[in-house]
Image (cartoon, rainbow, N blue to C red):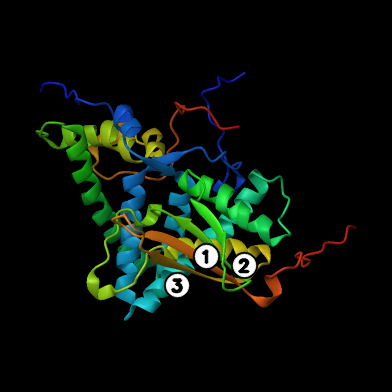
Amino acid sequence: MPPLTPPKSGDALFASVDRVNAELFTLTYGAMVRQLLTDLEEVEEVNKQLDQMGYNIGTRLVDEFLAKSNVSRCDDFKETADVIAKVSMKTEVTWVRDMLRGDDAYEMRVKLIKQVPEEYPYKDDD
Amino acid sequence: MIGVGKAKQYASVLDKPLSRGRQEVSLSAFAFLFSELVQYNQTQVDNIAELERRLEDAGYAVGARVLELLCHREKGNRRETRLLGILSFIHSTVWKVLFGKVADSLEKGTEHEDEYMISEKELLVNRFISVPKDMGAFNCGAFVAGIVKGVLDNSGFPAVVTAHFVPIEGQHRPRTTILIKFAEEAVGKVNQSWVVSGA
């Protein structure tokens, strides 16, 4: 299988889009979760809603990503996961980049919880 | 000495030090998230006033936290005690941190003593929102109004804050104005609540 070479690297793409403060994003997400918890009260229900919302956001994100990055069609799952891990996640949310490791690409499930790898490639903000 | 690439492992996320606030996410990520927030709220309400109320409440929570964070990080734990002080704090510092630029203008209302307006040519949250005709004057800026209200209320300057569209000559899209109407106890006084006696 020929190696996938994306025409634009994730970092270049991220540099070219407009950006907003991550704290606004985080706080807005927190407000949304708070609303869901107040309305639905059941944790399972909230999780389901969040899942659905995440799904919707994901489909729109991938549309935008495909529009911006000109990658060719992926032949199989492994390539898709590879592209997502290396290119698109860098585009949309930088901090996820450090948590997704290439090996996990075999699972399509994206882990958004911190893993405990041998070392992190970034410096601590001190 | 362990190499600089090694990150400290914290027992819980609450032990981590505050970040310096320089991290960014793409605008589209935020826009999608905000649109999901609005869409979800649309399913929970029957009318526009309630929808604006809910967005405002969501923003209120953000405002309260932003105030705490910025007070600590940017102002060295000093709090504003004057009306103009807190207004200019919102207009410049809060706006700069959240939206990357200071607000376009801060004006005092001409008709009433206790009214002020912060205007913005294009609010970030409204940038990708289109309002259908049957929703009339609905403004997603209610979220931002909520943020401002959260900051003001938690600084001890209670106010009613709303967002309005103001059509401008020669501009295709209307300007957004955040109208701040202060409550009685907030106007014209140095804020003396929270006097902490040293021990």
Is A16 situated above or below B107?
Answer: above
Which one is in front, B173 or A66?
B173
Query: Are the residues flagged by discs 1 and 2 in contact, CB closer than 8 Å?
Result: yes
Q: Mark 2: which amino acid?
A: Asp
Q: Chain of mark 2?
A: B
Q: Position of residue B148 (x, y in %)?
A: 54, 61
The residue tagged with tag 1: helix, strand or loop? helix
Q: Mark 1: which amino acid?
A: Tyr
Asked if badges 3 and 2 are on one and the same chain, I answer no
Q: CA distance from mark 1 to mark 2?
A: 9 Å
According to the picture, the residue beneath numbered tag 3 turns out to be: A38
Looking at the image, can residue B57 be seen? Answer: yes
Q: CA distance from mark 3 to mark 1?
A: 15 Å
Q: Position of residue B195 (x, y in %)?
A: 82, 64
* Image quarter hosting the N terminus of chain B: top right
Q: Chain of mark 1?
A: B
Asked if badges 3 and 1 are on one and the same chain, I answer no
The residue tagged with tag 3: helix, strand or loop? helix
Which one is in front, B106 or B79?
B106
Is B132 situated above or below A111?
Answer: below
According to the picture, the residue beneath numbered tag 2 turns out to be: B153
Q: In the rendered structure, which disc, 1 or 2, sits on the residue that comes first in sequence? A: 1
Image quarter for residue A29?
bottom left
According to the picture, the residue beneath numbered tag 1 turns out to be: B60
Q: Residues within 10 Å of mark 1 (few under 14, many from 20)?
A: many
Looking at the image, can residue A50 be seen? Answer: no
- Residue B103 placement, left or right of A101: right
Mark 3 vs mark 1, foreground winner is 1
